[in-house]
Image: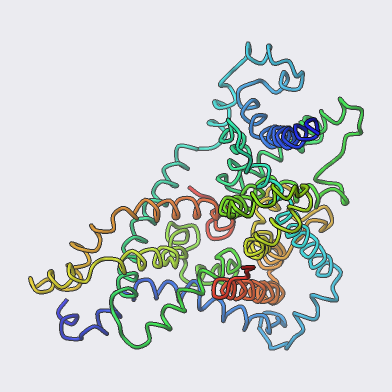
Amino acid sequence: MSNKRTAIRIVPVIILIALGLLWVIPLVWTLLAAFVPTTQLLSFTPLEWLQNLTFQAFRDAWSVAPFARYYVNTIIWVFGLLFLQLIAVSLAGFALARIQVRGMGFVFFLFLTQLMVPGSVLLLPNYQTIVRFDWIDSYQAMMAPYFASAFGTFLMRQAFKQVPKELEEAARIDGANTLRILWYVFIPVTRALRPTDGYDVILQRLAQRLQALGTYVRQFV
Amino acid sequence: MKFLKRGGPGAVAAAFLFPSLLFLTIFTIWPIFWVIWASFQGKVGRTRVFVGLENYTRLFTDPVGQRVIRNTLIYVSAGLVVSVLCGLLLALLLNQSLKYMAALRFPFLAPIALPMVSVAAIWLFLFTPRVGLINEVFQMVGLPRYNWLSDRELALPSLFVVYIWKQLGYFSLFYLAALQALPNDVMDAAKIDGAIVWAKFRHIIWPLVSPTTYFVSTIAVLNALQQIDHVFVLTEGGPNNATNMALYYVYEQGFKFFKTGTASAVTVLLLSVLLTMAILQYVYLEQRVHYE
């Protein structure tokens, strides 16, 4: 009986460890291949691997393509997009959270469609649009399709909804217009959210980049 | 700024929403209508003509189209089953209270953070027939070497392995959260009753995590349809269309063969699946599937 108990306890642990090892092999192997010469990699001799660690692969890779330029491009692209998107989502999020006018429900629905339809599915029509704007091979081509963000807008909307009404009224009595209220009250109060939106932009857009790269811009230089 | 003061809340709302709505319309709303229109168009010479449902019917009669539909169905349904069953199983394993659990979780969570492009590059290196790790290990244990990505039978399963390696941890995260929220008294009661492992799973855990199963199922279908970067990197739909799937087919027809009509028809079919999934998720959020 106690043997059976121990078995029930120990077998899952062993399975988990075995599975974990299996799962981590691709990562470890890639890491090894980056530092160990390919010829020695296949001899499966860890001791020799350690003696022959080299940065040669990185030097080779660096000389194959203008990576410095690629990194600059990526940084311009991501941070440019982040900056523009923060303006757009803050404005739209504020309108959706704090202004009650007719038709807001429909606007909300329009944003919702973007959450339901991933951009990669609309690659073909968006390509046609970008051709018509003559934006092929430009920064705009990589940024404009991602400028409006339903995720970011809803994130801002939720945050702005929680800002106390009194803060807004106090600012208004002091004579601030809506734009000033947004800039001096709502943006500072919800600053904790900025990294979340930034994370979404950077991670999601970087992940989606390949498809846009192959089509909207032919070479990312 | 003056008109904002005079126009009242309507004008302010319009001005604030304008930048987002403009780009939303150009790059999300308009394209949806455009593909629907384009899916009924064909080309005669260089001019577009209305062809009715021809783009759709050809999809189901053309051998490549049939192949694509078959591949997509196999891939997505296999993805659905494996995501739910293995995702839950992995979550059960990860839910044990062990000392170094964080380290044991790492291998499954790390691939989620990697973009599919990098994951595909890693696996390209493992699949390589001559120096790939998989074939080396196969040879060591006395198995034959395979051309994983250029074999008609093996290519699709190989892509599936890559996808599961990347995404399984993601699905089991939802289950892990569900398992940790299970009421302790129920689990204790099962222990006192001496429920054996299978009975405990079948009659307690499985029903209690059913809302999560519903959620994971919809996410799994969406993921399997959308994540096709590895097709670009590893096989480009080959060999002989053995790994050609819906979204890749859109790309191939639209950008390689300039068959806008066919590409649009597939896009419309994809959109309807995605919208159905979105509605199902909405229904789930509104009235949760529950046993209480």
Chosen colour scheme: rainbow
* Among the 4 quarters of the image, the one containing residue A128: bottom right
Name which residue lies at 45% across and 74% down.
Answer: A111
Is residue B198 at all visible to an observer of this figure?
yes
In the rendered image, the quadrant that contains the N terminus of chain A is top right
* Among the 4 quarters of the image, the one containing residue A99: bottom left
Residue A58, above or below A157: above
Relative horizontal placement of residue A197, taking residue B84 as reference (left or right):
left
Of residue B95 and residue B119, the one placed in the foreground of this image is B95
Residue A103 locus on image (x, y percent) = 38, 86
Of residue A150 and residue B104, the one placed in the foreground of this image is B104
Residue A186 locus on image (x, y percent) = 24, 63
Residue A31 locus on image (x, y percent) = 61, 29
Residue B280 locus on image (x, y percent) = 62, 74
Relative horizontal placement of residue A195, taking residue B277 as reference (left or right):
left
Residue B170, above or below B14: above
Name which residue lies at 60% across and 23% down.
Answer: A35
Is residue B163 at all visible to an observer of this figure?
no
In this rendering, the count of numbered labels is 0
Residue reaching furthest to the left: A174
Relative horizontal placement of residue B211, taking residue A68 as reference (left or right):
right
Of residue B246 and residue A155, the one placed in the foreground of this image is A155
